[in-house]
Image: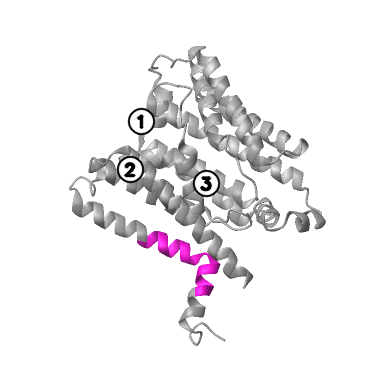
Amino acid sequence: MNAGSMPLKARFRREFISGRFDLVGLGLMLALMCLLFSTLTPYFLTLPNFKALGVAVSYHAILAAAQTVVIVAGLIDLSFTSILALCGIAAQKLLILGVPFAVIVVLVILFGMLLGLVNAVVCVAGGVNPLIATIGTGLALRGLAYIWLDLDTMPYFSDPAMSFIGNGFVLGLPVPILISAAVIGAIWILMRFTRLGSRIYAMGGSEAATRLAGVSVARVKTLVFVLSGAAAAVGGLILTSLNGTAFPDAARGDELTVIAAVILGGTALVGGRGSVIGTLLAVFVLGVMSNGMNLLGVDAFWQVFLSGIILLLAVVMDEQRNRARLR
């Protein structure tokens, strides 16, 4: 039976299961939100506001793209914001020591990868559930950040290169947007066109079948956690530059926003299915919601409340999709 002769209900069910429903729905939601806020405030549809919106969601987009990979693999990582904070502190400590900026970038990303490797060792070698393991490592790393800064923030820095990451422009575009576009593009290529990407999808779909196919599941899991750590390090560099200093509470609580974007973007909580493009659309949906509500003067607590409601709706939709697949 072709698509044209298929009953409307059956066609809707097929699109709902396939995941295209998520992309179309998110696109429509984003368009409607832009239309709504543009009518409620004259400041929304302005170039400065769009640039500010892009910068505001830049590090969230990087983190969400990486967490898409993690969840597609059938894993979970709740330590990424702690890694981000610790990497931001490391960057400024190195800056104070006079280390060249290019070297700082390399060392901080390697540091993030090392912290991701710690998660991999605990989960893969130690056999600990990723949820419990990354809650534990996240708390430990956040505590280490407090200890390293002695419960205080660092002084504001004036290094031009460091400031450029968060506040510079190239061809009229903010640098954080360009960095996030490059990182997200690389992750999209990884998941779409590489053997590792195929193995990540396969492992999330069935770890046992992937192992029987001769794939080193332990190696794939390790690479996924290392990627998560590297992305958190890049986010840490951007956020530290935007703030002009490092502090141990950086990105605390952003796990909700990032995980909400990943699930809202159509990534299955059970793994095996997900789209970086869908996640990116969801990041912008949440970003536009926050930006519009800020312009309207809505209390930040309501934004947290709405983010939680959106996450719940996304989880319910994911569960309904899984049930539809089993019918």
Residue marked by disc 3: 65
Label 3 element class? helix
Q: Is residue 285 above or below residue 244?
A: below
> Left or right: where does residue 199 sit relative to residue 142?
right
- Screen quadrant of the C terminus: bottom right
Q: How far apart are marks 3 and 1 (CA)?
A: 22 Å
**Residue 261: percent from left, percent from top:** 47, 49
**Residue 132: percent from left, percent from top:** 65, 37
- Residue 237 among those drawn in magenta: no
Q: Is residue 264 above or below residue 248?
A: below
Residue marked by disc 2: 302
Over which residues does the magenta segment extend? 13-28
Q: Are marks 3 and 2 in contact (CB under 8 Å)?
A: no
**Residue 281: percent from left, percent from top:** 43, 54
- Residue 26 among those drawn in magenta: yes
Q: What residue type is labelled 2?
A: Trp
Residue 257 visible in the picture: yes
Q: Residue at x 50, y 15 (%)?
A: 149
Q: How far apart are marks 2 and 1 (CA)?
A: 29 Å
By secondary structure, the bulk of the magenta-drawn segment is best described as helix
- Label of residue 314 in the image: none
- Label of residue 167 in the image: 1
The residue closer to the viewer here, 101 or 263, is 263
Residue 265 visible in the picture: no
User: Which class describes the residues within 10 Å of circle 2: few (<14), some (14-19), or many (20+)?
Assistant: few
Of the image marks 3 and 2, the number of the one nearer the N terminus: 3
